[in-house]
Image (cartoon, grey):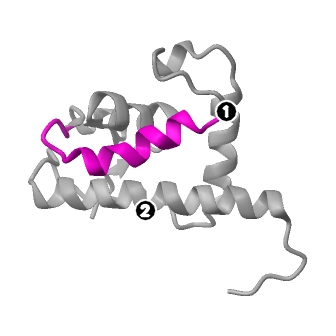
Amino acid sequence: MERTNANPFRDFWEVRADQLVQSVQHVLTWARDADALPSRQPGLQVDLSLHGIAMIAMERRLALLPPDAGPPADLTSAPDALILPLLRYLGETGGYDLELPCDRQRTDEPARQHSYVLSSARGQVPMGLP
């Protein structure tokens, strides 16, 4: 796809968004195929907040929305190769400290950068379950 008036910063966030979306799609596909999803009710969505990504990467749990949809899906048997891109994403997002819980980060920079990534996804964010 050819872009006119390309903004290098916008391109950076779009690339990050593409990588995040692909990584989450791989996890969702594995979860579906491994029957790790607790329910396939219509309307269930994946929590793609920074906290939701941290749950997948750090705790190997997949949070579903709405919050009363049930417990997070268990991803403990997911291959490391599926989880590593999300760990890398966190580590490269505004100084996210992998040693600290998501809600105890030293600054709000990781959340700010994650919001840029989500806004750059241009409608391709895989909110619904496969």
The answer to which of 116 and 7 lies nearer the viewer is 7
Q: Which amino acid does label 1 sit on?
A: Gly
What is the number of the mark on residue 22?
2
**Residue at the spot x=58%, y=27% of the render?**
96
* Residue at mark 1: 94
**Residue at the spot x=78%, y=60% of the render?**
10
Q: Which amino acid does label 2 sit on?
A: Gln
**Residue at the spot x=67%, y=33% of the render?**
94
Rounded to the nearest angstrom, the CA distance separating label 2 from label 1 is: 20 Å
Check disc 2 and report its element: helix, strand or loop.
Answer: helix
Q: How crowded is mark 1: few (under 14 residues within 10 Å), some or many (20 or more)?
A: some
Confirm whether residue 39 shows in the render: yes
Q: Where is residue 89 in the image (x, y as percent from the top left)?
A: 51, 43
Q: Is residue 52 above or below residue 95?
A: below
In reply to whether residue 92 is colored magenta, the answer given is yes
What is the number of the mark on residue 78?
none
Q: Where is residue 47 in the image (x, y as percent from the top left)?
A: 42, 42
Confirm whether residue 126 shows in the render: no
Q: Is residue 30 above or below residue 94?
A: below
| Left or right: 128 in relation to 79 | right
Check disc 1 and report its element: helix, strand or loop.
Answer: loop
Q: Which residues are drawn in magenta?
A: 74-94
Q: Quadrant of residue 73?
A: top left
